[in-house]
């Protein structure tokens, strides 16, 4: 740690209630946000109170340092980056302090979605809705004046603010009351000094505005929205100065918001959505102008590239979106009753499709599920641009242009001309009622030639914007990405911004370089480092690149924030690190995988409709987020961090915050494979340091099972014994309170051998190789027998190869890559031969299926591994295939039971969907007469294979799975059901009810194995043992 950071750490550690970090790993995590930029701070502070913020600001002012406030880091213009002290409000200052009838008092770190979830019970909402509102904090929304699709109905945060508590640049705390919203103000007494400070601020700001009244009026763009520069045109309210209207949207450059009172709005009663499809983008833009006058609440436009991407990345959208659509509008109405709502939607259809013949197809809905699907399409497709293959990415540097809505058709036509002149392709998205246009050109920011094209393109597009009297920023602010051009937009008004800044912050302490730029500020300064110089030591895998990777040339030297190929931040030297990858890929491929993360921050969500990231939900801190892991790997690959960091305990602690559930890979708009990156990181650590005792034990499940299986009765007594459980906890790190599975007195392998299931069949019909894995063999042979009997009942020939090994998923998840590769090689060699003979590989364990289908491809460079992956499926998906082809026997006996079904994360990753309609197990159980299935959509169970067995993870595992455990306690549920053995353990952790594999339920309904399965739903777990 360098002396400056060490001094800051020493000076502030004893002063703050919150956390301060100055180590390289944390600084790398906070060096970027959702923007293109990267600046490593000196320190990161997570304040717990107002006094923490005051202490940091005073310290910074005294020591000529800067302070950069940060919420979720979801903005795309670098507003939360800087080389000073970052204040992360999203950890310790995220409380809702009070709810009144039409307003709410909040701390800055609470996310808008969390706030609105709390307000639902009051039938209220904070209505401004930035696209990332599930993660955007209220402080970030106020600081940036963020709005979104519903601006026409909700207005902006500036319109909603009632009162602000702010820390000024010298550490003084003031309370600013809104003049426009003074009817809602709770005029609490303010200290005399603060009142005097406010009077001084009002006087000086008022003098500046009055002195430049005409200049301000002449500089206002002809737009519905404008977030460029300081908002000076509405600060004067009835001869009073409304400082709240100046503070909102000032990007933390005038003061730091530590508390706010904002107005809330009534929840809309009825909402309906229409999708309109067009053969031409111009027709869509023309229709949007007309639609904007029809009393809508939202209207968003998507171009052909976005529609194509949506179809390619989501099967539902593939069915929804016409192939020949060049553009689409999503239009929303709200009404007090359904009849009025349907009339509005019908009027829209009649006018735009039938009368004006602009749209060739219109789809309308008032159903919540469909409406949410339509909005999901609009809100997720832009970040999904990062799923595109190749090195060029959609780059948000001309992202937020605002023009008069009625000039939208003209602007889109002319901007396409500008892009064509520069030989650049781009995607286009627009909030049409406010005339806001998001243009994302496709460029490779690892190529200096493409970087050199950015500024000319930006100048041309911004120049066109000013020619049409528009604004370069409609909602997202200026930050690092647009401050450089503000002088061109405002001309003589620009020095007035500096006067305003000087009134509030003469020392330039607060978020410098935003709005009022530093002399060296430019569009391409401080761009993210994507790749360092060429490898100084190439691995064999680096020498082999695919066609996709070779699409763009890899430059010898790339721009970094500190010149070419050098990094003055952290302990890296800017050269590609000397790494020997543990997985089957090259350092370059690692970098590309990490680069796919654009930092959008959606992985910080805790929406109940999504699962990523279970660990972040239980521990909502930046290092828990998948984004943080991508930033660390990118830091190593780019040279910003030394590769030695991967061998340190601190790096491993962060890597361990990923337990390989694959939900981020599934739900991330860019589909970043964070699990693979973290398996590599753990592998790097263990390659240097070896395994800890608990990890060593749990990555040798084959040995552990073999040992316990030699004397199963003795082993079961030990599992039940509190004394032995204490020993397991203290010696081997297996949590004392965790329920564990019994060992069977006879393994499934022995039963299969006795029943001669290892002999190949000569049948030419469907043939199955059953890969049973460790749970079935040692703990639950009854499940294996049930599956075999179900297959036989459906005339499927079953082969159980003798001497099977385990899948090795626990080893993969823990980073024991060497052992995992050895197991994978053995399994692939055995299974590939059966595939060549026409067999399908089927398993009853989702983790085993995911290992065979996905993980082995990361471990082995082997055509047989691909062959095995392509021919592997899980048992319920296989049985549903039989049902769809009419081959599944339906002679089920009635079962009168209500079971609660949990979809395992690994099963969800295999299905690539969490929709109830796509879950094979649920569909199969619903075929049984009298059988009722309640899907317990409560997120990840938290068990994550062996993760929840370990003492150090036990409490967090329970925090993650608490909602599922509580759901299992519902008295109406007879039992639980899931395919995953580790999820079963968690589901039985907080209840004595049994959890049953769906295949066993099918076997029971078929009347198979009656003597063994007759008590299936009546079994009860014990204090320390599952059923």
Image (spheres, rainbow, N blue to C red):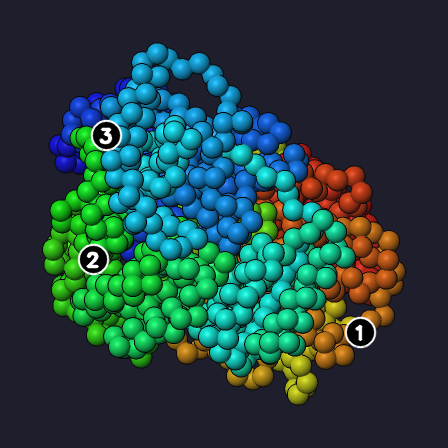
Q: Is residue 966 visible?
A: yes
Looking at the image, which residue is at 72% across and 80% down?
885
Count residues near mark 3 (Cα–Cα under 10 Å), then give few for <14, some for 14-19, many for 20+. Answer: some
Real-space CA distance between mark 2 and mark 3, rounded to the nearest whole angstrom = 29 Å
Residue 319 at what x, y percent from top left? 61, 74
SS at circle 3: helix
Pointer 1 residue:
889
Q: Which mark is residue 524?
A: 2
Residue 821 % position (x, y): 39, 63
Identify the residue position indicated by label 3 in the image. 503
Counting residues from the start of the chain, the first of labels 3 and 1 encountered is 3
Q: Picture coordinates of residue 498 (x, y %)?
A: 21, 39
- Reply above or below: 205 against 1006: above
183 relative position to 15: left or right: right
Of callouts 2 and 3, the N-terminal one: 3
The residue positioned 41% from the left and 43% from the top of the image is 145
Q: Secondary structure at mark 1?
A: loop
* Residue that extends furthest to the front in the rendered view of this protein: 214
Provide the secondary structure element on which disc 2 rests: loop
Q: Position of residue 942 (x, y in %)?
A: 55, 45
Residue located at (32% from left, 26% from top): 202
Q: Residue at x 16, y 26 (%)?
A: 63
Is the residue marked by circle 1 packed among few (<14), some (14-19), or many (20+) residues within 10 Å? some
């Amino acid at each position: 740690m360098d002396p400056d950071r060490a001094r800051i750490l020493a000076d502030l550690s004893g002063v703050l209630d919150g956390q301060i970090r100055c180590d390289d790993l944390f600084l790398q995590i906070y060096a970027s946000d959702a923007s293109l930029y990267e600046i490593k701070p000196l320190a990161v502070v997570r304040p717990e109170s107002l006094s923490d913020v005051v202490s940091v600001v005073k310290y910074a002012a005294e020591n000529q340092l800067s302070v950069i406030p940060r919420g979720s880091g979801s903005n795309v213009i670098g507003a939360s980056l800087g080389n000073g002290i970052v204040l992360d409000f999203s950890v310790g200052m995220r409380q809702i302090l009070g709810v009144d009838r039409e307003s709410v008092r909040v701390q800055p770190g609470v996310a808008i979605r969390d706030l609105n979830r709390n307000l639902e019970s009051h039938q209220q909402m904070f209505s401004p809705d930035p696209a990332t509102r599930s993660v955007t904090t209220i402080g970030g929304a106020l600081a940036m004046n963020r709005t979104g699709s519903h601006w026409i109905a909700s207005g902006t945060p500036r319109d909603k603010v009632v009162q602000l508590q702010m820390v000024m640049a010298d550490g003084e705390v003031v309370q600013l009351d809104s003049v426009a919203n003074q009817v809602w103000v709770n005029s609490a007494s303010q200290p005399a000094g603060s009142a005097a400070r406010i009077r001084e601020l009002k006087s000086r700001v008022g003098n500046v505005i009055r002195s430049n009244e005409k200049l301000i009026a002449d500089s206002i763009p002809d737009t519905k929205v404008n977030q460029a520069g300081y908002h000076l045109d509405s600060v004067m309210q009835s001869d009073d100065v409304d400082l709240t209207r100046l503070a909102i949207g000032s990007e933390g450059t005038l003061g730091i918001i530590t508390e706010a009172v904002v107005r809330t709005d009534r929840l809309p009663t009825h909402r309906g959505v229409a999708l309109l499809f067009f053969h031409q983008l111009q027709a869509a833009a023309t229709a949007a102008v007309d639609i904007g006058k029809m009393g809508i609440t939202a209207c968003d436009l998507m171009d052909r590239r976005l529609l194509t991407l949506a179809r390619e990345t989501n099967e539902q959208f593939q069915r929804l979106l016409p192939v020949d659509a060049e553009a689409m509008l999503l239009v929303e109405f709200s009404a007090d009753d359904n009849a009025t709502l349907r009339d509005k939607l019908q009027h829209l259809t009649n006018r735009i499709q039938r009368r004006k013949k602009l749209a060739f197809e219109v789809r309308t809905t008032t159903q919540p599920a469909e409406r949410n699907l339509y909005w999901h399409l609009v809100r997720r497709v832009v970040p999904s641009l990062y799923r595109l293959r190749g090195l060029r990415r959609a780059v948000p540097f001309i992202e937020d242009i605002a023009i008069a809505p009625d000039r939208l058709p003209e602007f889109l036509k002319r901007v396409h001309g500008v892009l064509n002149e520069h030989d650049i392709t781009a995607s286009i998205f627009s909030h049409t009622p406010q005339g806001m246009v998001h243009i994302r050109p496709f460029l490779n920011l690892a190529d200096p030639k493409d970087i050199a094209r950015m500024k000319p393109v930006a100048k041309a597009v911004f120049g066109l914007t000013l020619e049409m009297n528009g604004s370069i920023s409609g909602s997202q602010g200026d930050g690092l990405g647009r401050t450089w051009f503000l002088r061109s937009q405002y001309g003589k008004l620009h020095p007035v911004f500096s006067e305003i800044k000087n009134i509030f912050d003469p020392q330039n302490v607060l978020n410098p370089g935003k709005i009022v730029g530093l002399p060296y500020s430019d569009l391409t300064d401080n761009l993210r480092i994507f790749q360092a110089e060429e490898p100084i030591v190439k691995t064999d895998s680096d020498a082999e690149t695919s066609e996709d990777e070779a699409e763009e040339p890899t430059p010898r030297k790339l721009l970094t924030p500190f010149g070419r190929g050098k990094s003055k931040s952290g302990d890296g030297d800017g050269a590609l690190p000397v790494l020997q990858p543990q997985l089957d890929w090259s350092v370059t491929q690692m970098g590309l995988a990490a680069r796919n993360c654009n930092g959008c921050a959606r992985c910080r969500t805790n929406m109940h409709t999504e699962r990523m990231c279970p660990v972040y939900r239980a521990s909502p801190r930046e290092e828990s987020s998948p984004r943080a892991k991508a930033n660390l790997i990118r830091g190593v690959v780019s040279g910003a961090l030394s590769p030695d960091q991967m061998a340190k305990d601190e790096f491993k602690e962060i890597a361990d915050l990923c337990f390989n559930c694959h939900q981020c890979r599934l739900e991330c708009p860019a589909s970043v494979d964070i699990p693979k990156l973290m398996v590599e990181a753990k592998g790097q650590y263990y390659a240097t340091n070896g395994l800890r005792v608990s990890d060593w034990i749990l990555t040798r499940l084959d040995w552990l099972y073999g040992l316990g299986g030699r004397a199963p009765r003795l082993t079961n007594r030990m599992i039940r014994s509190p004394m032995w459980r204490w020993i397991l906890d203290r010696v081997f790190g297996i949590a004392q309170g965790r329920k564990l599975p019994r060992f069977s007195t006879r393994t499934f392998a022995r039963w299969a051998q006795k029943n001669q299931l290892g002999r190949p069949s000569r049948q030419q019909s469907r043939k199955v190789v059953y890969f049973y894995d460790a749970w079935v063999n040692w703990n639950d042979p009854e499940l294996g027998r049930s599956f075999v009997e179900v297959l036989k009942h459906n005339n499927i020939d079953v082969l159980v190869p003798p001497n099977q090994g385990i899948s090795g998923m626990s080893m993969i998840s823990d980073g024991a890559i060497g052992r995992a590769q050895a197991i994978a090689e053995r399994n692939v060699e055995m299974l590939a031969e059966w595939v060549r003979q026409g067999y399908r590989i089927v398993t009853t364990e989702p983790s085993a299926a995911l290992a065979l289908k996905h993980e082995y491809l990361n471990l082995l460079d082997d055509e047989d591994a691909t062959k095995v992956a392509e021919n592997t499926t899980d048992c319920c998906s296989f049985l549903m295939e039989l049902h769809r082809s009419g081959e599944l026997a339906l002679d089920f006996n009635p079962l009168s039971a209500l079971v609660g079904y949990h979809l395992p994360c690994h099963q969800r990753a295999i299905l690539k969907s969490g929709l109830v309609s796509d879950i094979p197990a649920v569909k199969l159980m619903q075929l049984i007469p009298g059988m009722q299935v309640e899907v317990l959509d409560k997120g990840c169970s938290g068990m994550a294979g062996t993760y929840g067995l370990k003492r150090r993870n036990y409490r967090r595992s329970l925090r993650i799975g608490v909602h599922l455990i509580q759901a299992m306690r519902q008295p109406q549920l007879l039992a639980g059901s899931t395919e995953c053995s580790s999820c079963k353990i968690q589901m039985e952790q907080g209840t004595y009810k049994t959890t049953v594999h769906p295949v066993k339920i099918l076997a029971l309904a078929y009347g198979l194995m009656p003597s063994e399965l007759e008590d299936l739903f009546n079994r009860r777990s014990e204090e320390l043992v599952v059923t």
